[in-house]
Amino acid sequence: MPPTQAAAEQIKISVRTCCLLIFVRKIMPIQRLVSLRALHKWCVVAIMAGVFSCIAVGFIQQAHCQQRTDFDQTLQAWKDKLKELAVLQREFNVCEEHEADDIRKRWRATKAEGDRIGQQLVKIGADVYEASNIDNQEIKQLLEWAAKQRYAEGQYRETAMIGHSLLRHDPQNFPLVFDTVRAAFFANEFDLVVKLIDDWQSRSAGESPELQTLSNLATAYQSEWQRELELREKEKNADLPQLELVTSKGKIVIELFEEQAPNSVNSLVHLVETDFFKNMTFFEVFEHQYALTGCPFNNGSGGPDMGILSEGNLPNARKHFRGTVSLRVNPQDQSARSQFYLLKIPMPDFDQQHVVVGRVIEGMDVVDSLTATHKLDRKLNPVPIQDAAPDHFISIKVLKKRDHEYRPEVIGR
């Protein structure tokens, strides 16, 4: 309804209210009614409420119209960038060798700008779709496409936010609910997981074992995540050690939890400083799970001659969230050596099995982009991906450490 029409309707309602008040004043005994002055006051209040209501309706509708205009303009800008990329691709296919570097440079700059516009487009689209009273199929298709892209890239929080907007007009869509809940869990958004599942259960008569499992895990992890956030806040000025991994996909910076896993951190820092990790690969990488590295044979069978006792069972051991760095523990003798995981998602099964030694503070997008080397078969057994080329270390170094010697207490093989 246009703002002017909405205003007229709201004023009509207010006038009818005033007339009703006056009519009641005439037919009811005076002792059971407010005074005439009070009645006049209520009439004024009713009219003013109508005026302010229609102004609010107008502002809301104008804001929605502006959002839609912004969406259309941003969509066109994004399409223009896609056309520019297509032109550059055609130019590159027929260019001379000396022109190639310039075209590559222009292509990277155009793509970066297109990615920025695309991010903005999805955000505006989600706002428009969620605020709209109709199920806009054009925007819905864009958001569904964006959700799949974000999930594939490991952008789980963005995936969950898009899914949350889509559920505004399709709350009974179980696949959408499940995908949104899963993405929220992967993003450490445990409160959102519980809320989404509670909303689904309040609307649906059926039960879902999959959602119930995620609900139980998220509920158990809510307090642990709050503890983790509190620890991170305290650690802002703790001057914790840091490692820098330069990989074939980019740079990753790791902060080490020396307070909770001191001997494990001593061991990692010592191995880095003695150049133990040179030329190693990420030999076991699963999409939407983890990347494993630290084996000198690049197959999971090796490590240094001396190991350390696991610190994973200590009372103050930290939990395995997305971005966690975890030292792998041999279950037979509870020893850890050099192999460590970079977790793409929370892994509650790893708690008390492996040792949380740190977290990724820069380059999580690099972790998500590491080439998958393994997948799960139908029986959920890990199998290698044929012809997968593992990513590797270019360099690894200690960025900073505390003022003491890093030499672990070791045990024999």
Image (cartoon, rainbow, N blue to C red):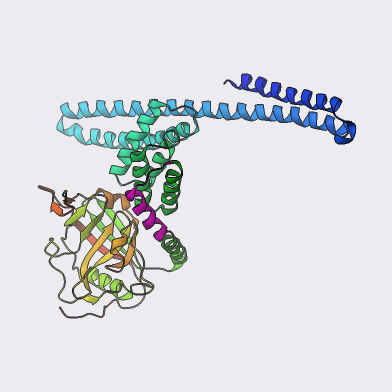
Does the magenta segment cover residue 208?
yes
Name the residue: 42% across, 60% down. Answer: 225
Does the magenta segment cover residue 410?
no
State the image quarter where residue 315 is shown: bottom left
Name the residue: 67% across, 24% down. Answer: 10
Q: Residue 25's x, y, as percent?
A: 84, 28
In this rendering, position of residue 13 left or right of residue 135 = right
Name the residue: 40% across, 39% down. Answer: 162
Q: Is residue 8 above or below residue 368?
A: above
Q: Is residue 308 above or below residue 363?
A: below
Q: Main secondary structure of the magenta part?
A: helix
Q: Residue 138's x, y, as percent?
A: 38, 26
Q: Residue 36's x, y, as percent?
A: 88, 30
Residues drawn in magenta? 204-222
Judge by depth and name the residue closer to the eye, 257 or 159: 159
Residue 89 in sight from this viewpoint:
yes
Q: Is residue 17 above or below residue 33?
A: above
In this rendering, position of residue 343 left or right of residue 131 = left
Judge by depth and name the residue closer to the eye, 7 or 338: 7
Quadrant location of the C terminus in the rendered image: bottom left
